[in-house]
Image: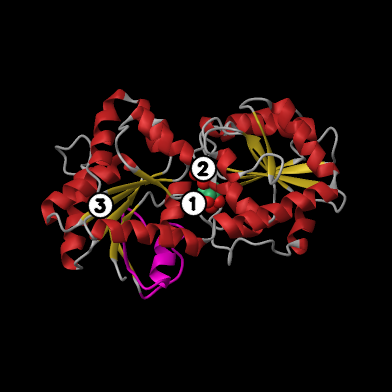
Amino acid sequence: MFVRIGITCYPSHGGSGVVATELGKLLAERGHDIHFITYDMPFRLGSFHQNIRYHGVEANRYAVFKYPPYDLALASRMAQVAKTYDLDLLHVHYAVPHAIAAVLAKQMVGDDLKVVTTLHGTDITVLGEDSSLKDVICFGITHSDAVTAVSNSLVNKTHQLFCADTFIDRIYNFVDTRIYYPRDVTFLREKYIYPNEKLLLHISNFRSVKRPMDVIETFNRVQKHVSSRLLLVGEGPELPRVMERVEELGLQSRVICLGKQDEVSQLVSLADLLLLPSEKESFGLVALEAMACGVPTVGSNADGLPEVVIHGETGFLASVGDVDEMARWAVQLLKNDDLHHQFSQAGLKRVKNEFCGNKIAEQYEAVYQRVLAGE
Ligand code: U5P
């Protein structure tokens, strides 16, 4: 089956955009025609591929508009690209405003154009609680031809918050194991830590839902028992407060802050442990990236994270905010090389069995086939 697919996502650093981009690349490799329709080039799109085209979206800034009408510009661009390239379907990642714009584009083009919406998390768990958006999110979901969500937890949450009757396929996120694998990064490791030290890693958008302050509190406890350093990757609103706390605790020499990075696969391989203490985490893509590099996660048991990290097998999970418990688990793993190796191996096996790209691409293709057959 060959499908012409328009993909819309947030092109910036974030799980939904990363997965949408990686999926587009993989589908292109599998022979499908891929058209990214976004306001900016997705940051992980990388080099040229003959089956991938990019169509930018520009919202008109005419003086009378207090807010540039991006959603309408997107719908209009989707419809235009769909007509020009005879697209079979629009696959949109993140409900707001993408699903709604896609439904509008379908109305402009005609019913042959199908809409597949993938829910990634905060579009449901955060925005779903906003009364100004709830109804329109529900509209986008119920008018899509198929809806997928990245974890069972997110499927259940969507049913609870929105539409109990809508069928939702659970399709997990994936990693490209040609990029994420346990790399030999000894040369880089020497630049950050001494040979007797351990390296803990946190990667996120430093928003409060990621609880980055808990990362610091956990690390502070860990470094009292294990000679270690903490690498912070990413940027976001909580980062200044986080760095203030690092100073208050006198940890400046132990915490390395790299800011936003476009390519994290080498950095992930550097680490002995990933810290992910999120308050909400529909999936936890960084935990999967870490697992693929043989790095266990210590984090919270929020939402879908236990579907990715198996407690006691590929990492350890504690209640949200329980930094003492997280620190205890981290110390246990960092002090016991055999246990660490066992978790690392179990993680690699799990990635191969559950989260490999081609397996996930096949699941999306099955959804495409179903909607195109009108089922
Ligand atoms: N990410 C980066 N660079 C950064 C911060 C995050 O590439 O500076 C990526 C992570 O590697 C992951 C995604 O793929 O963004 C964040 O996923 P999530 O935290 O939204 O699940």
From the top left corner, tell me how far across and down residue 258 is, in percent.
63, 48
Q: Position of residue 25 (x, y in %)?
A: 42, 65
Label 3 with label 1: CB-CB less than 8 Å: no
Given residues 320 and 208, the one toward you in this image is: 320
Whether residue 59 sits left or right of residue 32 in the image: it is: left
Query: Is 333 contained in the magenta span?
Result: no
**Label disc, if present, on residue 283 of the rendered structure:** 2
Asked if the residue under mark 1 is in contact with the one under mark 2, i.e. CB atoms within 8 Å, the reply is: yes
Across and down, in percent, residue 343 comes to: 73, 49
Relative side of 286 to 333, left or right: left
Q: Is residue 40 magenta?
A: yes
Q: Nearer the viewer, residue 241 or 93?
A: 93
- The residue carrying pointer 3 sits among few (fewer than 14), some (14 to 19) or many (20 or more) residues within 10 Å by Cα, namely many
- Amino acid type, mark 1: Asn
Residue type highlighted by circle 2: Phe
How many tags in the picture?
3
Mark 3 beta carbon near ligand 1 (under 8 Å): no
Q: Earlier in the sequence, mark 3 or mark 1?
A: 3
Name the residue carrying label 3: 115
Q: From the Cβ of disc 2, is ligand 1 less than 8 Å away?
A: yes
Ligand 1 within 8 A of label 1's CB?
no
In the image, residue 286 lies at what x, y percent? 58, 48
How far apart are the two marked residues, 3 and 2, measured between alpha carbons?
Answer: 23 Å
Task: Say if residue 267 shows up in the picture.
Answer: no
Q: Residue shown at 58%/31% (left/top)?
A: 211
Residue topped by disc 1: 173
Range of magenta residues: 24-50
Quarter of the image that includes the N terminus: bottom left
